[in-house]
Image (cartoon, rainbow, N blue to C red):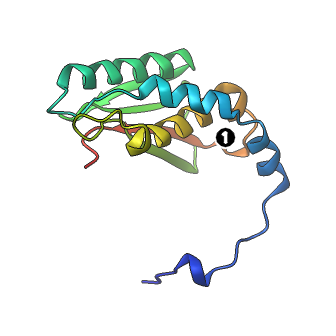
């Protein structure tokens, strides 16, 4: 196994196309998504709020045109494009629960916001990986 530390690695050159796509990411939309999911939603301690967060994510992904499924006993959300699957496969994910009693903006609302922004059709359609089977997973009980 190779373990690499960031202090020993130099950043690679950013692909021009990726940089262009990232320029299209709106800080205002990221903030909106963080606020959309920022309320106490621990799986056990705030169960009703956790179910509400799950419903919000299901509705958002459905609105983006993905097939969505709840998987497993912890209400993990898996979404994929409504088209034939092909390789390569790409998986993006974030946990959508929070620490009890906290809004979870940083743990892990910020990652949920980034994933939702990447799933936004206007961003996703500009990525070359759109031809991959893009699986989206939001999993519960992240701690």
User: Which residue is at the front of the view, 63 or 30?
Assistant: 30
User: Which residue is at the front of the view, 12 or 124?
Assistant: 12
Q: Is residue 78 above or below residue 56?
A: below
* Residue visible at 67% across and 40% down in the picture: 131
Q: What residue did someone put label 1 on? A: 131
Q: Is residue 26 left or right of residue 138?
A: right
* Residue visible at 24% across and 34% down in the picture: 101
| Secondary structure of the residue carrying numbered label 1 | helix
The percent position of residue 118, horizontal first and vertical second, equals: 61, 37
The percent position of residue 10, horizontal first and vertical second, equals: 69, 78
* Residue visible at 58% across and 31% down in the picture: 31
Tell me the quadrant of the picture where the N terminus can be found: bottom left
The percent position of residue 32, horizontal first and vertical second, equals: 56, 25
Q: Is residue 142 left or right of residue 78?
A: left
Quadrant of residue 6 within the rendered picture: bottom right
The percent position of residue 65, horizontal first and vertical second, equals: 56, 19
- Residue 117, can we see it? yes
Decide: few, some or many residues near mark 1? Use Cα within 10 Å; few <14, some 14-19, many ≥20. Answer: some
Quadrant of residue 39 within the rendered picture: top left
Q: Is residue 49 left or right of residue 103?
A: left
User: Which residue is at the front of the view, 95 or 104?
Assistant: 104
- Residue 81, can we see it? no
Q: Is residue 15 left or right of residue 9?
A: right
Q: Is residue 112 above or below residue 121?
A: below
């Amino acid at each position: 196994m190779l373990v690499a530390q960031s202090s020993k690695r130099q950043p690679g050159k950013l692909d021009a196309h990726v940089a262009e796509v990232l320029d299209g990411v709106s800080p205002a939309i990221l903030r909106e998504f963080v606020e959309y999911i920022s309320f106490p939603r621990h799986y056990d301690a705030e169960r009703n709020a956790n179910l509400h967060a799950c419903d919000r994510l299901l509705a958002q992904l459905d609105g983006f045109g993905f097939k969505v499924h709840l998987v497993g006993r912890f209400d993990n959300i898996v979404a994929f494009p409504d088209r034939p699957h092909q390789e390569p496969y790409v998986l993006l994910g974030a946990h959508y629960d929070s620490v009890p009693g906290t809004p979870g903006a940083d743990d892990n609302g910020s990652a949920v916001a980034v994933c939702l922004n990447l799933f936004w059709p206007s961003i996703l359609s500009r990525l070359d990986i759109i031809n991959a089977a893009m699986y989206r997973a939001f999993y519960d009980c992240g701690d």
